[in-house]
Amino acid sequence: MAGRQLIFADGEYYHIFNRGIARQPTFFSKRDYERFLLTLSYYRFLDVPGKLSRYLSLPQDTRLQIMRSLEKSQKSIVEIVCFALMPNHFHLLLKQTNEGGITKFMSKTINSYTKYVNTKQDRVGDLFQGVFKAVRVETNEQLIHLSRYIHLNPVVSRVVSEHELIQYPWSSFAQYIQTPTFVSNTIVMNQFKTKQAYKDFVFNQIEYGKRLEEIKHLIIER
């Protein structure tokens, strides 16, 4: 990661984001979104048994056993607190849990997904715009507001309306309100009495511009 000044530290939280080259799409179908989410889920673990492509070539029963073993071990290089995927960009809120974890996680995720798209579309070269952007979360208040910003991004990006947000499958918002899968959302949800309280917190700022000045240092590109 030549040129990056930010040093990732264990136990710290970071806003990670990037977009497609020249703002071009990075997700072209439902299958692409599903593949990216699988890539995130797989590479968050410390001891994955090789590349995702090899894992996917194994019988389904074997894959289930491997995933259960990884989850049982609770050994990770990052925790995924929340995420949102849009047609030409993504946002992640990550906690680094192992030295060098975020750099390794993002490198494996981007390389794996790019190779998948390039093979599928018979293309070559990068898919995303240079090195991913990263901003350290400095306070608990910033963490909470950032989770809201990320979950509102499909609305802000005009991908869905506010009424459709809870059904948007490529964001962790539904996992916060319903049942979490691979997101580690307790750092956020433990600060709300109920799931409805968090939902209200998000929707109370649906006009996110009212608070943009307060969180822009978290989302500005560096």
Image: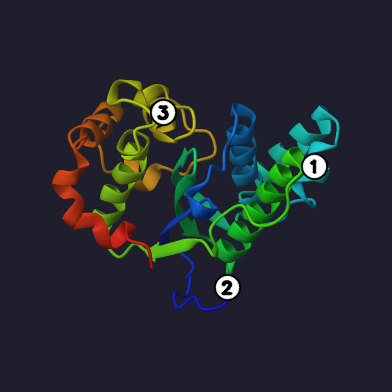
Q: Which mark is residue 40?
A: none
> How was the colour assigned to the protein in this rendering?
rainbow
| Identity of the residue drawn at 48% across and 70% down | 8
Q: Position of residue 86 (x, y in %)?
A: 46, 39
Residue under circle 2? 1
Could you tell me which residue is drawn at 61 percent across and 33 percent down? 34
193 vs 182, nearest the viewer: 182
Is residue 99 shown left or right of residue 173? Answer: right
Q: CA distance from mark 1 to mark 3?
A: 27 Å
Q: Is residue 200 above or below residue 110?
A: above
Helix, strand or loop at label 1? It is helix
Residue under the image location 26 percent in, 49 percent down: 145
Residue at (53% x, 58% y) in the render: 129
In percent of width and height, residue 185 lies at 41, 42
Q: Which badge, 1 or 2, is on the more N-terminal residue?
A: 2
**Residue at numbered disc 3:** 174
Could you tell me which quadrant the N terminus lies in? bottom right
- 57 and 60: which is toward the camera: 57
Q: Quadrant of residue 16?
A: bottom left
Label placed on residue 55: 1
Q: Is residue 85 visible?
A: yes
Relative placement, left or right, of 110 versus 14 is: right
Q: Amino acid at mark 3?
A: Ala
Amino acid type at image mark 1: Tyr
Looking at the rendered structure, the secondary structure element under dot 2 is loop
Is there any visible trace of residue 12 in the rendered image?
Answer: no
Q: Earlier in the sequence, mark 1 or mark 3?
A: 1
Marks 3 and 2, how far apart at CA: 33 Å
Q: Residues within 10 Å of mark 1 (few under 14, many from 20)?
A: some
Query: Where in the figure is residue 46, as x and y percent of width and height?
Result: 67, 57
